[in-house]
Structures are given as structure tokens and as C-alpha cells.
Image (cartoon, rainbow, N blue to C red):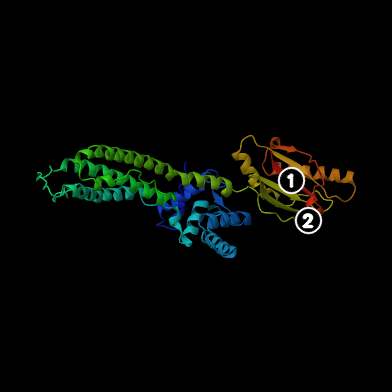
């Protein structure tokens, strides 16, 4: 069943903006498809560092110091302290709200609608200008100088050209509409608008021969239809662009937001003890021993909970038990001690309720893999195969 991200956000912000929540979900993308990557571990410095660098700095564009940004993350973590697992969408919403940047995740107003409205206004203006340009002159044309002595005959008033004005105005309006849409597109994408290539000047200056203008309405009508087709294709382009940020944000979430699955460095006890960590998304249980001893620490049974949960959720998985020793002392005696420690851990796993058939004893390639730390060498690791 799909996660109700908005419900979790509204536990902290009852009147949360659904549009901003949807934008954050789009930004996170496939990082929300797995439980591990859909949560934020406030106790993991590597995870909070990713939130600071990728979300606060890169996505929100914040320029405060790392200490100030870390304080913002810690404040959100304190606000959500009632939850063991912090929902990533909720953490991002609360951070964006704190810095007043929820608008980053809201889709802009319908730019295409504004462009069309502007184009419609331009249609009216172009029709008025074109109508004035096509009005027949009420004054007779001046006679050439060579014919000055002969008075020209009085010509009848030219027939009204109203039928031509209407289609020309409509065509010019359509062209203006296309230009307005292109201008709007230039504002959205930082590209220069495509210029209009045909020249309207003869329409205004050539008033002597009305018959020569017969082809102009068809030319302008064709140009208007072309501009309208271009507008429609641009609209389709914007519809695709509306999805593009989601695809980009998804890629960013996949590359930057998905946790590595590696826990923070663990502190090695100086004697007997138990530590738990995660490697590649799988739980690892490490048991440390006192020098020369093979007794398992008392907290072992309780510490096996992550292993049991993983085996229950992943049918067919099994455990590998590998023993190590420090690099000091007799090598043969150390080998026996390593086997005894591994056997003690296997018995403790069975006693904790894990089937013996799901446990395998695996000898590591380097049984003294302590990296110079003898306390770290005296251990048995239980990993998921």
C-alpha cells in the first residue's frame, strides 16, 4: 500500500501545503521506494551531512555556515524526537518551512494561460492598428509634377475594404498570439524568442494600388496559421517540461539522497562486548572477547533482534559466523581459541531462537584482521550471506 506522506507531515503541520508535499515527493523520487532510504537517521553524521549538502545547499540554495545548517537539522530532529524513524518527506518539509522556501516545490502558475491571454490582448490591439492602416484615404493623391497644368479627373471614392480588414486583422492577431507565446517561452527557458520574419511595411505604405494587395491576406493568414501551429507545439513542449524537474530530481535523489547503508564507525570495546552495525543494508553483529577467553557477553540475546528480523523478512537468507584473534601469542593456540569463540557465538544464536540450519561457520581469509588493534582482533562476526 502506498505511503501517505502527507499524513505524516500533517502530524507536525496540520495545515501543510499539499502542493509542497507533492513537490518534495517528486524531488525524492525513487529514494522513497525503499524503507531504508525513505527515512533519515538523525544520529548518523554521514546522513545529516547528505541532508545539509544535497538538500539545504544544492536544492534550497542556502548559503549559511555548516554549523547553522546543522543546527536547523538538529532542531527538526528534536521536533520529531517522538519518532524513532524520521520520515524523509516530513524532515524536508519542516526544513523548507523553517527557511521559508516551501515555494521551491510548488509548480508555477499556468504560464501558458498567461501567454494565451496576452496573445488575445495582442489580437485586439493588432486588429485596431491594422484596421487603421487599411482605411481608404479621404484626400485625393497628389498629381505628379509633369502633369500639374492638367487638372486630374475627380475619381469616385474607393470602395470600402472592410471585407479585407477582418481576415487580415484575424491573421495578424494569430501571428501576434504566436509571438506572445514565444516571448513567454523565452522568459521560462532563458532562450530568445523566435523573431517574426515577414515584413508588414508594404501593407501600410502601399495605398496606391489596392489590387496589388490581394495576396497579402492569404500570406498573413498562412503566417497566422503557422504561428498557431508553433504555439500548439510549444504548449506540448511545456507539458513535457512540467515533468522534467521530477525526472531530474529523481536522478538527483538516486545519485545523492539514497543512503549508502553503512552505519557510523562503531566503538570497539576493550574487553567483552557486543556491537551492531549495518553493511550494504544488512545487519552485522560483532561479539568481542576478553583476552584468552571465549565467553559471550550477557547482552548477546537482545542484540540478535536485527538478525532475526532480517531472516524473517528475507526468506532463504542465512548467517555466517567467522572468528578472529589478535596477532599476539602462539598461532596454533590462537586458531583453537578462534574456533571456540565462533562455536560459542553459534550456540548463543541457537539459544536466542535462530535455527541452527540457518547458521554456517565460515573461516575468514585473515583470522588476525585487526588492523593493528588487538582488541578489535578478539572478535566473532555474524553476517548475512
Helix, strand or loop for disc 1: strand
Task: Tell me which numbered mark, 1 or 2, is placed earlier along the sequence.
Answer: 2
What is the count of numbered marks? Answer: 2
| Neighbours of disc 2 within 10 Å: few (<14), some (14-19), many (20+) | some
- Front in this rendered view, residue 267 or 300: 267
Camera-near label (1 vs 2) is: 1
The residue that appears at 68% across and 46% down in the rendered structure is 284
Q: Which image quadrant for residue 269?
A: bottom right
Q: Position of residue 358 (x, y in %)?
A: 69, 36
Gap in angstroms between the C-alphas marked 1 and 2: 15 Å
Could you tell me residue 289's position as x and y percent? 78, 51
Give the numbered dot on residue 381. 1
Check disc 2 and report the residue beneath it.
Answer: 271
User: Is 345 left or right of 317, judged from the image as shown?
Assistant: right
Q: Quadrant of residue 267?
A: bottom right
On the question of residue 116 being in view, the answer is yes
Q: Residue at x 64, y 46 (%)?
A: 306
Asked if residue 144 shows in the view, the reply is no
Q: Residue furthest right?
A: 330
Would residue 222 be found to the left or right of residue 99 on screen? Answer: left
Question: Helix, strand or loop at disc 2?
Answer: loop
Query: Which picture quadrant has residue 318?
Result: top right
Q: Is residue 64 above or below residue 232?
A: below
- The crowding category of the residue bearing disc 1, from other C-alpha atoms within 10 Å (few below 14, some 14 to 19, many at least 20), is many
Q: Where does the image place residue 326, in percent across and percent down from the top left?
A: 83, 50
Mark 1 touching mark 2, by CB under 8 A? no
Q: Quadrant of the C terminus?
A: top right
**Which residue is at 60% across, 48% downward?**
259
- x then y, percent, for residue 41: 58, 54
In the image, is 240 to the left or to the right of 377?
left
Amino acid at each position: 500500500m502506498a505511503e501517505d506522506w502527507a499524513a505524516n507531515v500533517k502530524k507536525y503541520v496540520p495545515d501543510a501545503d499539499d502542493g509542497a508535499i507533492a513537490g518534495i515527493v517528486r524531488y525524492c523520487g525513487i529514494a522513497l521506494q525503499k524503507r531504508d532510504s525513505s527515512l533519515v537517521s538523525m544520529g548518523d553524521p554521514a546522513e545529516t551531512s547528505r541532508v545539509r549538502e544535497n538538500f539545504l545547499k544544492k536544492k534550497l540554495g542556502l548559503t549559511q555556515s555548516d554549523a547553522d545548517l546543522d543546527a536547523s537539522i538538529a532542531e527538526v530532529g528534536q521536533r520529531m524526537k517522538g519518532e524513532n524513524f524520521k520520515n524523509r518527506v516530513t524532515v524536508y518539509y519542516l526544513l523548507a518551512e523553517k527557511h521559508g522556501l516551501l515555494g521551491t516545490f510548488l509548480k508555477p502558475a499556468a504560464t501558458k494561460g498567461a501567454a494565451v491571454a496576452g496573445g488575445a490582448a495582442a489580437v485586439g490591439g493588432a486588429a485596431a492598428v491594422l484596421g487603421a492602416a487599411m482605411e481608404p484615404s479621404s484626400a485625393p493623391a497628389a498629381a505628379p509634377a509633369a502633369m500639374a497644368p492638367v487638372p486630374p479627373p475627380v475619381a469616385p471614392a474607393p470602395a470600402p475594404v472592410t471585407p479585407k480588414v477582418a481576415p487580415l486583422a484575424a491573421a495578424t492577431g494569430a501571428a501576434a498570439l504566436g509571438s506572445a507565446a514565444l516571448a513567454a517561452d523565452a522568459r521560462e527557458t532563458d532562450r530568445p524568442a523566435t523573431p517574426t520574419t515577414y515584413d508588414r511595411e508594404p501593407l501600410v505604405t502601399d495605398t496606391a494600388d489596392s489590387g496589388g494587395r490581394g495576396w497579402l491576406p492569404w500570406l498573413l493568414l498562412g503566417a497566422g496559421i503557422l504561428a498557431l501551429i508553433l504555439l500548439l507545439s510549444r504548449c506540448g513542449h511545456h507539458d513535457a517540461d512540467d515533468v522534467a524537474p521530477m525526472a531530474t530530481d529523481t536522478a538527483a535523489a538516486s545519485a545523492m539522497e539514497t543512503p549508502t547503508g553503512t552505519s557510523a564507525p562503531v566503538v570497539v570495546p576493550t574487553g567483552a562486548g557486543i556491537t551492531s552495525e549495518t553493511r550494504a543494508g544488512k545487519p552485522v553483529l560483532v561479539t568481542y572477547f576478553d583476552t584468552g577467553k571465549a565467553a559471550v557477553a550477557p547482552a548477546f540475546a537482545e542484540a540478535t533482534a536485527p538478525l532475526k528480523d532480517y531472516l524473517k523478512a528475507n526468506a532463504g537468507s542465512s548467517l555466517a559466523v567467522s572468528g578472529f584473534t589478535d596477532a599476539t601469542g602462539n598461532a596454533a593456540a590462537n586458531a583453537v581459541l578462534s574456533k571456540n569463540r565462533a562455536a560459542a557465538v553459534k550456540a548463543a544464536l541457537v539459544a536466542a531462537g535462530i535455527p541452527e540450519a540457518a547458521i554456517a561457520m565460515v573461516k575468514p581469509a585473515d583470522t588476525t584482521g585487526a588492523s593493528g588493534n588487538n582488541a578489535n582482533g578478539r572478535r566473532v562476526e555474524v553476517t548475512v550471506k
